[in-house]
Amino acid sequence: MISLKKVSKVFEGKRKAVALEKVDLQIEKGQVVSIVGPSGSGKSTLLNLIGGLDRPTSGEIEIEGEKLGELSDDDLTRVRRDKIGFVFQFFNLLPTLNSLENVALPLHLRKWPRKKIEERAKELLEMVQLGHRIEHLPDELSGGERQRVAIARALAVFPPILLADEPTGNLDTRTGQEILKLMEDLHTRLGSTVLIVTHDLDVAKRSSRTVALRDGRIVEDRQR
């Protein structure tokens, strides 16, 4: 499903910064994996590379049989669009679009028929328990509701992989637990492979596997 072989990422500048160094990682279909570590350990860099948002300096990344390093920018965009859903700490919803329109965006990019787009977007908002908030703009929603909309948008095409970067980091404890429960329920229902970057060890404890990074290297890989 997801394979990294000797993956390194170096940021060049006045001072060279090694974000990841020779990382080997295999993630099987349907696993829920938490990626933990202190700030600057390479967690978000790892997630961005797996998601095709950046390219490694060296090494090989394979997603569902496709070697990302061999893909053109257009093909990399296709992989992100069709195979990967993203959930971010700060939601990244478009402020001028309501809940339904935000969730529908990935479907418009795939040029779905308008009627099917509306049906799927409504279905997803019902799945995240926001069927009653479809016409609300982001600033009319609570933090937890915005994250639910973001999760619905990430799942719009039922991608096989869901990448979440600190999905509870901007939420209070209770709301964060509700979002985690929602993600667990959706994982059970859809069977997506889920990777969660988190500083919160309570979040990591709910995963079936925890990968710990320090100074750009994997220092622990624990399964439950």
Image: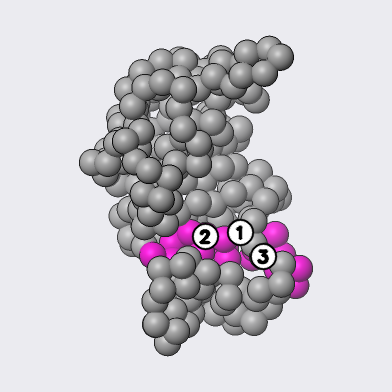
Quadrant of the image occupied by residue 32:
top left
Let me know if residue 119 appears in the view: no
As for residue 146 lying within the magenta part, the answer is yes
The part of the chain drawn in magenta is 138-157
Quadrant of the image occupied by residue 222:
top left
As for residue 213 lying within the magenta part, the answer is no
From the viewer's perspective, is 105 left or right of 31? right
Q: Residues within 10 Å of mark 2 (few under 14, many from 20)?
A: many
What type of secondary structure mainly makes up the magenta span?
A: helix
Let me know if residue 85 appears in the view: yes
* Nearer-N-terminus badge (3/1): 3
C-alpha separation, residue under disc 2 versus residue under disc 3: 14 Å
C-alpha separation, residue under disc 1 versus residue under disc 2: 6 Å
Q: Position of residue 142 (x, y in %)?
A: 72, 65
Amino acid type for the residue under numbered disc 2: Ile
- The answer to which of 54 and 217 lies nearer the viewer is 54
Q: Which quarter of the image is occupied by the C terminus? A: top left
Residue underneath mark 2: 151
Quadrant of the image occupied by residue 25:
top left
Q: Nearer the viewer, mark 3 or mark 1?
A: 3
Which labelled disc corresponds to residue 94?
A: 3
* Nearer-N-terminus badge (2/3): 3
Contact, CB < 8 Å: mark 1 with mark 2? yes
Q: Position of residue 151 (x, y in %)?
A: 52, 60
Q: Is residue 167 above or below residue 218?
A: below
Q: Position of residue 167 (x, y in %)?
A: 58, 48
- The answer to which of 170 and 54 lies nearer the viewer is 54
